[in-house]
Amino acid sequence: MNRKAQSEPERGGSRFKAVLTLLIVAAMIFAAVKIVPAYFDNYQFQDSMQSEARFALSYPKKDADQVRQDLWRKAQDLSIPLAREEDIKVSMDQTNVDISVDYSIPVDLKVYQFSLQFHPHADNHTI
């Protein structure tokens, strides 16, 4: 009977550890569902910026406003909160294109709120 009494707290401890582990895993999955899409959207937006910078001076040649408009549309498609004129900076001359954007995405994890800061940059400079 002594062995049975000793094993009872161990089973309860195992259950507690299992529940705690499940709670931690669930919290990590919840956080990932909230955070990962913002990084994926940023990756797609960065790719669009690089394409715009690379081909802006090709035929048909685009001006800075057309590049800004195309990127703003892409940001709208990805639900990235950007102001077209203030947040998308396009600098162009005869041979170079530089594009930079600064934005933040608010993340609400119910118990903690923060903003993810993104600063994508693209240009048409060769390596």
Image (spheres, grey):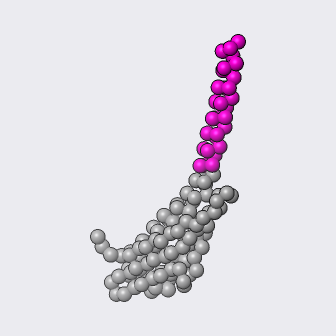
Q: Is 103 within the magenta?
A: no
| Residue at left offset 58%, top offset 80% | 83
- Residue bounds of the magenta highlight: 1-29
Horizontal side of residue 13 vs 103, given as left or right = right
Answer with the quarter of the image where residue 6 lies: top right
Is 87 rendered above or below residue 31? Answer: below
| Residue at left offset 55%, top offset 65% | 116
Is 27 rendered above or below residue 107? Answer: above
Answer with the quarter of the image where residue 74 lies: bottom right
Camera-side residue: 57 or 101?
101
| Residue at left offset 69%, top offset 29% | 12
Camera-side residue: 91 or 26?
26
Residue 1 appears at what percent x and percent y?
A: 70, 12
Residue 87 appears at what percent x and percent y?
A: 53, 80
- In which quadrant is the C terminus drawn? bottom left
Answer with the quarter of the image where residue 17 lies: top right
| Residue at left offset 30%, top offset 73% | 126
